[in-house]
Amino acid sequence: MNAQNGYSIFLVDDDKMFLAALKNSLQQQFGSSLQVSEYTNGEECMENMDNSPDIVILDYYLNDEEHPDAMNGLKVLKEIKSISKDIIVIMLSGQDKLQVAIDSVKNGAYEYIAKSESAFVRIQNTLKNATENIESERESNKYMKWNIAMGVVIAAIIIIDVIWYYSSHYTF
């Protein structure tokens, strides 16, 4: 998604009430700058990765009693990162276990947030930082493209100048 349209974000959580509350919270905080898509399992999220989200907020435990064979968040995280290392993934978990946080960050998560009373505020702050990083990367890419274009133009001018010099000073 380009800078004029804001940011594309996937919310992935098997808890539909939490998912709806999170979406509402983010829309109140960020308004129309976020294009939000919701998924209740990792498989559905992965099926839609061709929509190239900028950010994925992903629950760690996605396999519940109803879906014991569903992909867990760590597996989804690994698959997302195999598709694109540029997608920012924020991991969530209802359990505040250090090993879960370590595994998440080790596998490429931008941040790990435990679901608690302050989770929505932490998600909003993390999302604000993530969007600033994305914007910085977009600006950097824009200047990189500009620098490459200018380099090509300068090289073309030098080549034309050399050809003109040799063709005007030497007869073949």
Image (tube, rainbow, N blue to C red):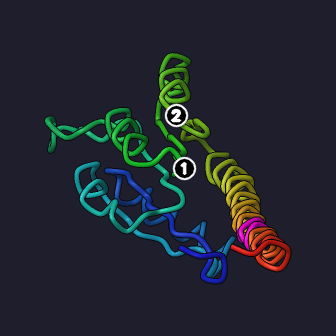
Q: Residue beneath label 1, please?
A: 86
Main SS, magenta region, reads helix
* Secondary element at image label 2: loop
Residue 36 in percent (x, y) is at 48, 71
Q: Residues within 10 Å of mark 2 (few under 14, many from 20)?
A: many
105 and 144: which one is in front? 144
Which residue is at a point 53% across and 73% down the rendered structure image? 1
Residue 68, percent across and down? 15, 35
Residue 27 image point, x, y percent: 59, 74
Quick check: 136 left or right of 68? right
Residue sitting at 48 percent across and 22 percent down? Answer: 103
- Circle 1 SS class: loop
Q: Residues within 10 Å of mark 1 (few under 14, many from 20)?
A: some
Give yes or no for residue 150 being in the magenta stretch.
yes
Q: CA distance from mark 2 to mark 1?
A: 10 Å
Q: Is residue 66 left or right of residue 55?
A: left
In the image, what residue type sits under mark 1? Asp
Q: Residue at x 37, y 68 (%)?
A: 51
Q: Earlier in the sequence, mark 2 or mark 1?
A: 1
Q: Which residue is mark 2?
A: 108
Q: Is residue 169 magenta?
A: no
Q: Amino acid at mark 2?
A: Gly
Q: Which residues are magenta?
A: 149-156
Q: Depth-wise, is mark 2 or mark 1 nearer the camera?
A: 1
